[in-house]
Image (spheres, rainbow, N blue to C red):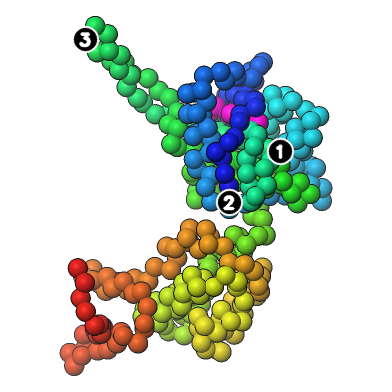
Amino acid sequence: MINYQEVAIDGLSIHSIGNKVREEALILTDDPVSLHEPHLTGIIKKYFFHSFKTPEFFCFEPVGPILENNVIYRTVASVFDGSTEIHEASKIIAEHLYNQSTASNILAGDLMIALIEDVVVEDEMVSAIGIYKSEQKDDFIKLLLQNKEYNLSADKGININKLDKACLIFNSNKSDGYKVLVTDKKKLNGEAHYWLRDFLCVAHREDDYNNTTVYIQATKAFIDEKLKDEFDLGSEVESAFLENSKDYFDSNENFDEGEYLSKVFNDEKVVNAFDEFKQDRSLNLKNTFDISTPAVKKNASVFKSVIKLDKNFHIYVHGKRELIEKGTDEDGRKFYKLYYDEETT
């Protein structure tokens, strides 16, 4: 649970970050930005926090064998312990980001760094440091009504509903690399890995959220990449396995691997194949953990069971594999037979 209702912005610095390999400038400002207008402060808070609703925590990783070699970890730690002012720290962070902007397709942008107070994270009130890079500017129209006439003008600015790249670092669990939230709208593209890997150098924390997510995705990958080939599964069987997995995560608070594999696959050969899959992939899956409801909700699309028949039909399967029959007629055409009690509209 993360609560931003009572947060206060204690310091805000903004710098301009160019692309180093294209010889674009790094411009460091001399002073922090003053926030005196309540309405503007409210807009900035919305921009800073609206994308961080899910407790998908990361943590800073050591560079070499030492955690303090991680530039961002070392810098925010000095702010949290009071030895460095946030504006001076923001310059170090901006220089580090600039030095990591060495791929030609990395966009220039504005870097905002804020010291934030009174964030509630998992029932603990802590301070935090937010780092936000805005790369895209949207066009917008300004309307000014004067003497019963409108004057129109156009401008560019930041869309407060869109975060390009950002992270929130909470002053909690310092020895384990802090609790960190990260967003990157281009995170699916290999070109954008520099934000997580090169700049922040973070990895998922080993917590219930991550354990739940990893097991759901591992189950789906196992079905897609191993079971289909080795066991010649029909789509209806695959759908049944996914539905069994969904039922388990929806109806249990605690995860037990043996119980889960038995209920999902109900076949010793398939369970053994899953063990082989884990070893082949070097998957570090926990045997027991508390199931994270937010993680189950976020990964809901993994459980979607759709049987696609040519370009004519899609069958959405929500359970009860025994109500589906698959066959071939005397002319060689394949068919599915579905049993049901009543039709709903």
Label 3: state its secondary structure.
loop
* Cα distance between the residues tagged 2 and 3: 49 Å
Tell me how far mark 1 sits from mark 3, CA to CA: 53 Å
Relative vertical location of residue 208 with respect to residue 231 in this rendering, above or below: above
Q: Is 200 contained in the magenta span?
A: no
Q: Which residues are magenta?
A: 109-115
Q: Quadrant of the C terminus?
A: bottom left
Question: Disc 2 designates what residue?
Answer: 1
Which secondary structure dominates the residues rendered in magenta? strand
User: Residue 304 or 191: which is nearer the viewer?
Assistant: 304
Q: Distance from label 1 to label 2 (Cα)?
A: 25 Å
Q: Position of residue 296 (x, y in %)?
A: 50, 63
Which residue ends up furthest to the left in the rendered image? 331
Q: Residue at x 25, y 82 (%)?
A: 340
Tell whether 29 sits left or right of 219: right
**113 in the magenta segment:** yes
